[in-house]
Image (tube, rainbow, N blue to C red):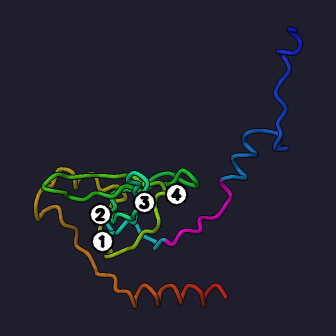
Amino acid sequence: MAKAASKKAKNTLGEKTGKQLIRRLTAKPITKQMDTFSSGDTVNVYVKVKEGEKERTQVYKGVVIKIQGSGSAKAFTVRKISSGVGVERTFPFRSPLVERVEKLSTGKVRRAKLYYLRDLDGKSARIESELVTASAATSAKTSAKTTEA
């Protein structure tokens, strides 16, 4: 009986190691509709919220204060002021709860991590920005497609 217990479980997926399985899972491309954004940009994040049996989409609007990680572990943090209280929420890029991310304006910042915004109140917490119009976003997408072809 001791010999039977010492046998390793056979891998039914045909993979040699766990690393190869992880590589295969993380190699899948992201198929979500996401605008490219960076720290300082104001974004709308469309998040799926489940309430009982119903599922609805909730919009979370705020400033991107950091983008961290790489590959499948890449995530971004959005900060907003709700009822006078600062609220930060981190979203993984590959999360099934995030439907899409829409960029509203481009922030003019010189830092990758905007942690200093946590200490600022009122008008001093604002970031100088340029508005992103819908026509500009579509023209950028079409110009990217023409350069690929």
Q: Tell me if residue 140 is in the magenta stretch.
A: no
In percent of width and height, residue 121 lies at 12, 56
Q: What are the residue bounds of the magenta stretch?
A: 26-33
- Number of marks in the image? 4
Of callouts 4 and 1, the N-terminal one: 4
Residue placed under numbered mark 1 in the picture: 107
Task: Give the CA distance from mark 3 to mark 1.
Answer: 32 Å
Q: Residue 63 carries which label?
A: 2
Q: Name the mark nearer the viewer: 3 or 1.
A: 3
The local crowd at label 3, few if under 14, some if 14 to 19, many if 20 or more residues have their Cα within 10 Å, is few
The local crowd at label 1, few if under 14, some if 14 to 19, many if 20 or more residues have their Cα within 10 Å, is many
Say left or right for 92 vs 43: right
Task: Give the CA distance from mark 3 to mark 2.
Answer: 25 Å
Q: Which amino acid does label 4 sit on?
A: Pro
Task: Give the CA distance from mark 1 to mark 2.
Answer: 9 Å
Q: Name the mark nearer the viewer: 3 or 4.
A: 3
- Labels 1 and 2 touching (C-beta < 8 A): yes
- Labels 2 and 4 touching (C-beta < 8 A): no
Of callouts 3 and 2, the N-terminal one: 3
Q: Residue 96 carries which label?
A: 4
Q: Which mark is residue 55?
A: 3
- Labels 3 and 1 touching (C-beta < 8 A): no
Question: Which of the 4 quarters of the picture holds residue 18?
Answer: top right
